[in-house]
């Protein structure tokens, strides 16, 4: 049996404390009504991770911190596997303790941050941006082909093809300019 480090368990507890209360309650319900796995959101057998179990019970939260902490705590490998009874007991006890002792300072701060983001308010007072004199030319250039000089290529051969096309278009323009001068 593998041992779990104190730091990893503490990370899971903090991630649980950051979840909204409704999500923690829904996760507890989900533990009772679903087969829980580690290492994936769901598997071929219909088993689910704790976050999806909570989601299905009305705890609609997308907090990647919990999923990462859960996978670290369980030592999730490359393939999903059923959660052990020990892992489930630990998760249940952490959820119950978090609900019993109320919102921690961390949970309160996380909830305040979520409210501020949802309402569109800034959470941190920032200095106003310095005016550099540069202006957006997006409206002016949007109709011109090839105005964006920076493109992202995932493959080198795509980059080479785009470069060859640009060179071909440049040669065609030069050829047209020569015809206009001569003609």
Image (spheres, grey):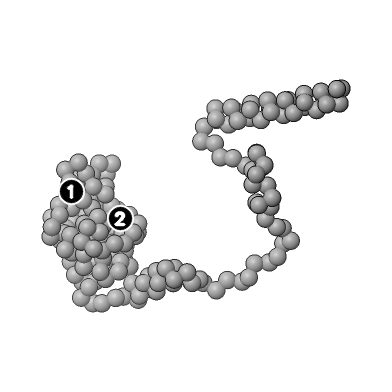
What residue does disc 1 label?
47
Q: Quadrant of residue 11?
A: bottom left
Q: Quadrant of residue 164?
A: top right
Mark number, residue 67: 2
Q: Residue at x 35, y 57 (%)?
A: 64
Please state, as top left, top right, bottom left or bottom right, where the C terminus lies in the image: top right
Mark 2 element type: helix
Q: Quadrant of residue 59?
A: bottom left
Q: Position of residue 108 (x, y in %)?
A: 35, 75
Q: Position of residue 23 (x, y in %)?
A: 26, 65
Label 1 Cα neighbours within 10 Å, binned few <14 / some 14-19 / many ≥20: many
Residue 73 showing in the rendered view: no
Whether residue 140 is situated above or below residue 172 in the rendered picture: below
Q: Residue at x 70, y 57 (%)?
A: 135
Label 2 Cα neighbours within 10 Å, binned few <14 / some 14-19 / many ≥20: many
Depth check: give the residue in front, 72 or 29. Answer: 29
Whether residue 106 is situated above or below residue 73 in the rendered picture: below
- Tell which circle, 2 or 1, labels the residue nearer the N-terminal end: 1
Classify residue 128 as left or right of residue 33: right
Classify residue 135 as left or right of residue 122: right
Which tag is nearer the camera, tag 2 or tag 1?
1
């Amino acid at each position: 049996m593998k041992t779990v480090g104190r730091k990893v368990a503490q990370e899971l507890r903090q991630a649980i404390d950051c979840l909204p209360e409704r999500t923690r309650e829904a996760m507890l319900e989900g533990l009772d009504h679903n087969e829980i796995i580690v290492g994936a959101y769901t598997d071929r057998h219909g088993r689910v991770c704790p976050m999806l179990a909570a989601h299905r019970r009305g705890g609609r939260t997308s907090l990647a911190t919990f999923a990462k902490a859960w996978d670290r705590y369980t030592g999730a490998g490359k393939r999903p596997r059923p959660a052990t009874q020990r892992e489930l007991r630990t998760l249940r006890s952490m959820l119950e303790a978090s609900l019993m002792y109320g919102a921690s300072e961390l949970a309160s701060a996380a909830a305040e941050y979520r409210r501020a983001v949802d309402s569109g308010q800034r959470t941190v007072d920032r200095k106003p941006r310095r005016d550099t004199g540069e202006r957006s030319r997006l409206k002016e250039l949007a109709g011109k082909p090839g105005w964006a000089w920076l493109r992202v290529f995932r493959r080198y051969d795509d980059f080479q093809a785009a470069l060859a096309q640009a060179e071909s278009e440049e040669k065609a323009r030069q050829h047209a300019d020569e015809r206009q001068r001569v003609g």
